[in-house]
Image (cartoon, grey):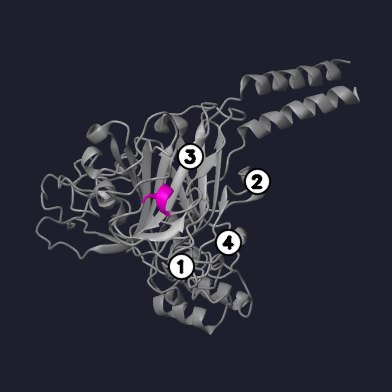
Amino acid sequence: MKRYVWLAMFGLACAVRAWAAPTMDGTVTPGDAYGTALSVQNTNTQFGNAGNGDQVNGGGGSEIDQVYGTVQNGRLYVTVTGNLESNFNKLEVFIDSKAGGVNAINGTALPTDVDSYCCGGPGSGSGALQRLNGLTLDAGFNADYYLTFTHGKESVTPPPANPEDPAPPARQFWAISAHYADLTQGTNGAVVAAGVQLAPQGKPNVLRFPGDYNHNGAEDAADYVLWRQSLGQTVPRGTGVDANNNGTVDSADYDIWRSQFGGTTTLADNPWYPDNPTQGASGTLTGPALPGLVQGQLIDRSYATTSGGCNTNDSGNGCIAPELGFVLNVDPNDPGNTKNHRNFNNTIGLQLAFDNSNTAGVSGDSPFETPTAGDPQNVNTGLEFSIPLSQIGASAGSGPIKLSILVNGGGHDYISNQFSGDGILLGNVGPSPFPNLAGDYPGNQYVTVPNSGAGSGASLAAVPEPATFLLMIFGCLTCGSIRRR
């Protein structure tokens, strides 16, 4: 009987393992099943070093410390640990997932309007790929798909409450956004502005002003009581009642509460952008959750016009949070797009989470030509994303997936010295003309994600693979037979 019980337990354990997938929170943990890092950075960053530990505004600096990847449940999961400066620096991801693709980026032969509001505007014939023109990837790496991620202070102008009222001032808020392109169809390849998130770690929340320590939607006496109870405690920076991000609950946190006392922090209130974490750290700025939104989900027009309440005419009226207007299509009655709508529509099922709190890893100082003396191997927070294999022309067991990842400037036209793979041991690559990664740097500036088919192939709301399913049936039948005896 004991043997049957153990077999049943083994079958169920295998089923759970087959369903396991990383949690979209911008952090690599043992439970995420990523395994060992695919690459560890050897080159100090020349794009600055983040130092204040805020989950959004890391204090300046962009670096790639480690890259993790796995294929689970019919999706590719990737985490790039490190930092991305909140000045709209870019994390560029080229994906080689099937036969064909391009080795050299020729902007005239690839889709335009990728991240178009960065680079010329919609219909300008420009975009991220045109700004990357001339970059040649490593030998044996032929990019089929492209993703780019960026974040910083955005703004949106909601319409006036009444037609006769003047337009209210623009609402400023933090957002991280994602864009995608299919590189296999020439200039006809699909271009997708996938969506945004409004809170770090993939949380389905918005950011509101600091001091609402108990997150009840109001800055009131209850927050003062919580501050008093926590006074003098040492906490993880920017969490709990540590509004000024110094790791200690002190009088500065009281001052922040007092400066905002009497205010409300509901979805309808003004957004807050963490320009300076000493005036409000992202952990304590996390406001109410958006209804119907789950962790890791991107906010796009489809969400905004359903759960988000926005009118389907793209006017920006009706939005339960003012910043949701940002993801709408351009209002036909506002051809100049003064409202700053951005046409986001996540047709590719992309998921995302971002935690910019790293203060370790590679240094931001020279030398760049010798291996770093930092500890990139200890960095486990950064940018995490997940995309269905079907959206990158792959399937479970179709073969390994290569990723060439680099940090770029805000205009997609000034490449740093931070790459996935073996590392370049040099300073910033800089502006065009861009290098030939195979000819100019030793080693491979890409990583390879295994895709053997094991533990893969199901959807996110998955059923187990056949072998696991049989083990589950066997386990259940065995348990049933034991009970009958």
Q: Amino acid at mark 3?
A: Lys
Query: Which class describes the residues within 10 Å of circle 1: few (<14), some (14-19), or many (20+)?
Result: many
Q: Please give the residue where the numbered disc 2 appears in the rendered image.
A: 31
State which tag comes first along the sequence, 2 or 3: 2
Q: Main secondary structure of the magenta part?
A: helix
| Dot label at residue 380 | none
Query: Which class describes the residues within 10 Å of circle 2: few (<14), some (14-19), or many (20+)?
Result: few
The residue drawn where x is 23% and y is 49% is 116
Residue 485 against residue 414 in the figure, above or below? above
Region of the chain picked out in magenta, as a range? 436-440
Residue 422 rendering spot, x and y as whole percentages: 53, 53
Q: Please give the residue where the numbered disc 4 appears in the rendered image.
A: 376
Residue 238 rendering spot, x and y as whole percentages: 52, 69
Real-space Cα distance between discs 2 and 3? 23 Å
Q: Amino acid at mark 2?
A: Gly
| Dot label at residue 58 | 1
Real-space Cα distance between discs 2 and 4? 20 Å
Residue 7 rendering spot, x and y as whole percentages: 81, 25
Real-space Cα distance between discs 2 and 1? 26 Å
State which tag comes first along the sequence, 2 or 4: 2
Q: Is residue 17 magenta?
A: no
Residue 407 against residue 12 in the figure, above or below? below
Q: Please give the residue where the numbered disc 3 appears in the rendered image.
A: 402
Front disc: 1 or 3: 3
Kindly state the secondary structure of the residue where label 1 is placed: loop
State which tag comes first along the sequence, 4 or 1: 1
Kindly state the secondary structure of the residue where label 2 is placed: helix
The residue drawn where x is 55% and y is 26% is 397
Real-space Cα distance between discs 3 and 4? 21 Å
Front disc: 2 or 3: 3
Q: Please name whichever residue, 121 or 237, is drawn nearer the observer in this view of the structure.
A: 121
